Image (tube, rainbow, N blue to C red):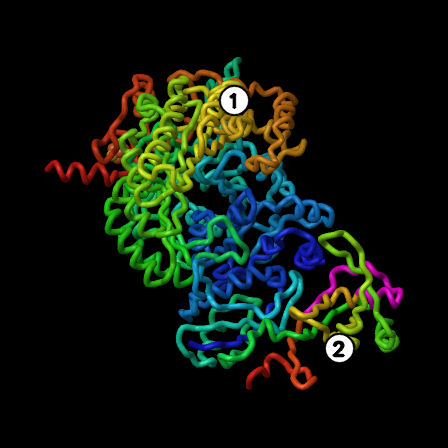
Amino acid sequence: MSRYSIKFKKEGYLKYTSHLDIMRFFQRTFKRADIKLLYSQGFNPHPKMSIAQPLSLGYTSTGDYIEIETESEMNPDNIYEVLNKLMPLGIEIICVKAINQGKKTLAALVEFGEYEIKLGDEYKNLGPLIEPFMKQDKIQVKKLQRKTGIESILDIKPLIHDLTSEDFEGHIKLTMVIRNGSQANLNPELLLQALLDYSNCKKNYSGIEVNRKELYYTQDGKLIKFEDYNC
Amino acid sequence: MTIANKIDQILIKVEKPARYIGGELNSVIKTPGKDEGQFETRFVFAFPDLYEIGMSYLGLQIIYNLLNQEQGIFCERLFAPAQDMEALMREHQIPLFTLETKTAVTQADILGFTLQYELSFTNIVNMLDLSGIPIKSQDRGETDPFVAAGGPCAFNPEPLAPIIDFFMIGDGEELLLEVCRIHLEWKRSGEKRLSFLQTISQIKGVYVPQFYEIKYHEDGSIRDVLKTFDKAPDRIQKRIVSDLETAVFPEFNIVPFIDVVHNRATVEIFRGCIRGCRFCQAGMIYRPVRERSKNKIKELAQSQLKNTGYDELSILSLSTSDYSEIEPLVSELMGVCHTNDVSLSLPSLRLDSFSVKVLEDIQGYKKTGLTFAPEAGTQRLRNVINKSITDENIYYAVEQAISLGWQQIKLYFMVGLPTETDDDLDGIVEIARKITDLFYKSKGNRGKFNITVSISNFVPKAHTPFQWFPQCEISEFKRKHYYLKDKLKMMKNITFNYHGTDASYLEALFARGDRKVCDTLIKAWEIGCKFDGWREHLKYEKWLEAIALTGLSADAYIYGNRNYDTILPWDIIDSGVSKEFLIRESKRSIAELQTPNCNAECQDCGILAMHNCHVKQVKLNEQI
Ligand code: SF4
């Protein structure tokens, strides 16, 4: 019995597949690979397999993680090789690592996510505004409560770890490290909206590309990449 | 902007965008060219309904595998976009595109629709329009794709005849390959469109409607069929794949990302049916019975499971229990499923002691419900329709099932059958009542128990002994539904479902229609009809409007009596089953006589003129 963390990419049209679709996809992949997952006990047993942090429909990711528990111990390099042979275009396994039994689940570990957003050149002048934007005492956004329909004002500043921009082939690329996970969570598009509000740029963006690059947890106040978990 | 770029702008706004992206496991992409692995002929397999429905259809997987194995040919997929997607596509002027390469359908060489049910026909018109292909065959030019169709509804091709350039009748495996190979030659030759159609009209199984002109009597019935191309065959014989053992069958099924109707590995165990139920079109048009060997079935099942990772295996046929080695097959498949840790599902089982036992093994504590399809409520009416199940069969199996712990029984019946009276409806109520009694007798008042009675409306289908019978009137259908509802609602634990009568009326119109029906179809689409097979989308008022606007005597098709000499619109298609046999069966039905099934005694259905019949052969050998 062993635990593994699998880092994978999800690109191209696969950004239109949902969290559930990807779960189903992996479950079948493990079957094809003859990797036997451990099952939970109980009336309705399900395989021990979970995705660290669900990705919104429409986002690509170069840093997604799935955690599995297998019936018998395996060599992570073998898992990596077998799985990669079975991937369709758009999904790729980046690395596989063994994790210790006692450790927290990946899902419980997530604290931050790093996202890249590409915007068209009509947003060129955003770059210099980032510093003053981040220096504000509060960064307030309106948020519509889905259940109640009530709009509330939210200060998202504490949820932002870092925000930078760079020019990129005639586009502007924003990189943000923001809170993710069960304790606190910021939607990258909410931050983008706040920035656009601040800058008086055209607000009705469409066709933006969002890519998740990495997930982080903290240790002694420092952000540590998921990839380096337990190594 | 390319189509791919344009769709990227709208996909995020639609429900289930993964319906439109392709790229699933085991899907195939080829590039144009003459080299190994490239293609010259692009066939687009079109399913005129949503992705989730089409991807659950095994025929798609068969054709896709078959054509993509062939050098020079590329098969892509196409489904009807849902209404939200369609609206955005129209707004952004995006033509209908294929899943594999996001290419406009106008770039296809052959666009082939599968006709699984009549109420998908408006979607075909809509899909042609969304593609920018002229709807009627006569309006298409040299650069347009050929629009083809096949599948069970092609056995009455006439309502679509003005739209479809050519139909393929019967089993598609060999026929489609021949057509595509000829297309490849034709494309290289640079000949005219007409010459391709003329060439393929010489292949057995191909029907090119424009080579036939229909002459009508004053009352609208058919007087004569004239050929406009003298080499076109008088009648089109359906194609039959002789040997399922060697026929191409998918081992690398495309595995959808999204949840579709059936997410499972599926192996067809035999084609055809020995039963001869008189209302059943499939039982007639898929004759003769051809089986796949037990070992081959196991091999295919294993390989599909390996290549897809599915956690369920199912077998497919018209009547599972009639497979010659059903008991060993099931026990060996249970073995396969056990080793692979997947579940087994056995549809279309006739419920007897063996199958109840098997279902107990398979379902264990997750009992889902047992299904019986007596189809009619009395023995008399079951004699009329030639359904061999008896009351004793039902009660015996139900008693066993109850003692093994089943608490849910589903019963399927048809109403509006020829010669039906209220006594037959009372018979339905009686069966439900007896089953309830059996439950309480065995379990006392303990436990939840539920019976679902589902009623469908009889639609007289082409190539069946009932093809001459009129359909029951709408008002009479409704009366029958309420009659049953009134009686059944007095009883506890009964759930009652019935089909919409509007849908059945339209289904009959297209099941029995001729070429004149096509203008009504196009008109209905023009005024907003599509997805008619979906209860929530069917606009019956619009249909009536279309019928009125085109001056169609719809009732005459549906309620008109046809005698045995009438030329029927589908007579041009030779299903292999002879008219003599159908007439004989039709007369026996009126006389309330059952006809033995093929295993018991060959009935000389006529198929022997076209193909040998294994069932008959086995019988003959036994006699010697
Ligand atoms: S030839 Fe005889 S046995 Fe074969 S399908 Fe026809 S009736 Fe049945």
**Which residue is depicted at the point 23% across and 39% down?**
B615
Q: At label 2, which amino acid type do we have?
A: His
How far apart in space, not on screen, are marks 2 and 1 (Cα)? Answer: 67 Å
Quarter of the image that includes the N terminus of chain A = bottom left
Mark 1, residues whose alpha carbon is within 10 Å: few (<14), some, or many (≥20)? some
Badge 1 marks a residue whose secondary structure is: helix
Ligand 1 contact, mark 2 (Cβ < 8 Å): no
Q: Which of B113 and A5 is in front in this view?
A: A5
Mark 2, residues whose alpha carbon is within 10 Å: few (<14), some, or many (≥20)? some
Region in magenta = A193-211
Which image quarter has ligand 1? top left
- In the rendered image, residue B60, in percent from the top left (x then y), is placed at 46, 49
Quadrant of residue B305 within the rendered picture? bottom left
- Label 2 lies in what chain? A
Residue with the mark numbered 1: B478
Tell me if residue A200 is in the magenta stretch. Answer: yes
Any mark on residue B581, and which? none
Residue with the mark numbered 2: A161
- Label 1 lies in what chain? B
Q: Which of B531 and B422 is in front in this view?
A: B422
Residue A119 showing in the rendered view: yes
Q: At label 1, which amino acid type do we have?
A: Lys
**Which residue is depicted at the point 61% across and 66% down?**
A54
- In the rendered image, residue B103, in percent from the top left (x then y), is placed at 61, 54
Quarter of the image that includes the C terminus of chain A = bottom right
Q: Which of A78 and A135 is in front in this view?
A: A135
B267 above or below A177? above
